Image: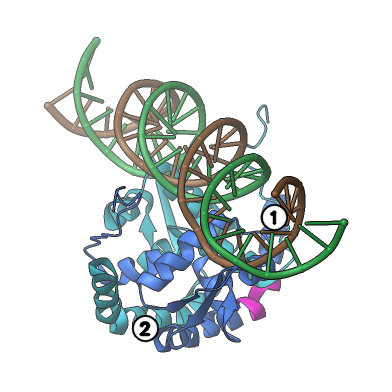
Chain colours: A cyan, B blue, C brown, D green
Amino acid sequence: MPNQPLESFEYDNPCPIRDVLDRIGDQWSVLVLLTLQPGTQRFNELMREIGDISKQMLSRTLKHLEQDGFVTRTVYPEVPPRVEYRLTELGHSFLEPMQALVNWADSHHRTIAEARRRYNRE
Amino acid sequence: MPNQPLESFEYDNPCPIRDVLDRIGDQWSVLVLLTLQPGTQRFNELMREIGDISKQMLSRTLKHLEQDGFVTRTVYPEVPPRVEYRLTELGHSFLEPMQALVNWADSHHRTIAEARRRYNRE
DNA sequence: CCACATGGGTCTATTAATTAGACTAGGTCT
DNA sequence: AGACCTAGTCTAATTAATAGACCCATGTGG
């Protein structure tokens, strides 16, 4: 174990709700979880599926999600390597309320786009 | 109108859901909306209430939320100035599914904290 | 009359986060 | 031998966020 971990995973937010929401409320976590919803995906599949995420951020996001128990990471010792990511029970459970939010976004995005245009005109 | 707007508000995300969620999925938007839930708040009240947000980010976040129609901004031409922020119907409507997510976070944060400790031990 | 406080910001300089792209490993295929 | 595969990591360059100084007009205290 020659090198220090580059990022420590300790996290001491006094508010547990903010602690949870700050973690999954970053740019990518929810998108990764939604992409994993249909089933197991490999690293590069996630890259392709999401399209505009960088390797580093996908790697870090998956690491966080794994740490918090949202996904599992399974390595198959083959060559070339194969690593599969899959939602846990917790991950699926999270996507239930999240799905309600996605539905909200889906049914209100026109209203929002409209508000944005109006604001820009003035 | 001598100076260009420093940040353009155009935003052309091909996926409308990501367009909406990316906007409110930043570090502060949800927190600001939740803080406005009980009722009208002034700028510095929001600062104090949230505690660890910078003026600039609060200003920018409120501007985005106003642009997207989540909050209204009312200026009273007094001295010293008074500016009140208040949720719109859309803002309140958004907080309904969001509240479900907050509840989820509240009831699962122990499980998550546990997973995080386990991960760090290994 | 001068100094200071006030609220809601903006501007700037420093620090942190994100990105793009090069690089690695061991094995298969030509 | 040389090229290719995946799942990352490392570094350098770009971008975003923060802290703190500053601004405006007016009201208050001395």
Where is residue B55 shown, x and y percent of the image? Answer: 58, 57
- In this view, the residue in front, A36 or B54, is B54
Quadrant placement of the N terminus of chain B: bottom left
Q: Residue at x 69, y 55 (%)?
A: A11
Residue type at mark 1 is Tyr
Chain letter of disc 2 in the image: A
Where is residue D6 shown, x and y percent of the image? Answer: 34, 43
Chain letter of disc 1 in the image: A
Where is residue B98 shown, x and y percent of the image? Answer: 50, 81
Provide the residue designation for mark 2.
A104
Q: Are marks 1 and 2 on the same chain?
A: yes
- In this view, the residue in front, D9 or C29, is D9
Q: Which comes sooner in the sequence, label 1 or label 2?
A: 1
- In this view, the residue in front, A68 or A114, is A114
Q: Which residues are magenta?
A: B105-111
Residue type at mark 2 is Trp
Q: Is residue D11 left or right of residue B68?
A: right
Q: Is residue B26 visible?
A: no
Q: Residue at x 50, y 81 (%)?
A: B86
Our reading of the magenta stretch's main secondary structure is helix
Q: Is residue B51 above or below residue B97?
A: above
**Is A6 included in the stretch rendered in magenta?**
no
Q: Secondary structure at mark 2?
A: helix
Neighbour tally class for label 2: few under 14, some 14-19, many 20 plus, Cα within 10 Å: many
Residue A121 falls in image quadrant: bottom left
Q: Which mark is residue A11?
A: 1
Q: Is residue A7 visible?
A: yes
Count of picture labels:
2
Q: Nearer the viewer, mark 1 or mark 2?
A: 2
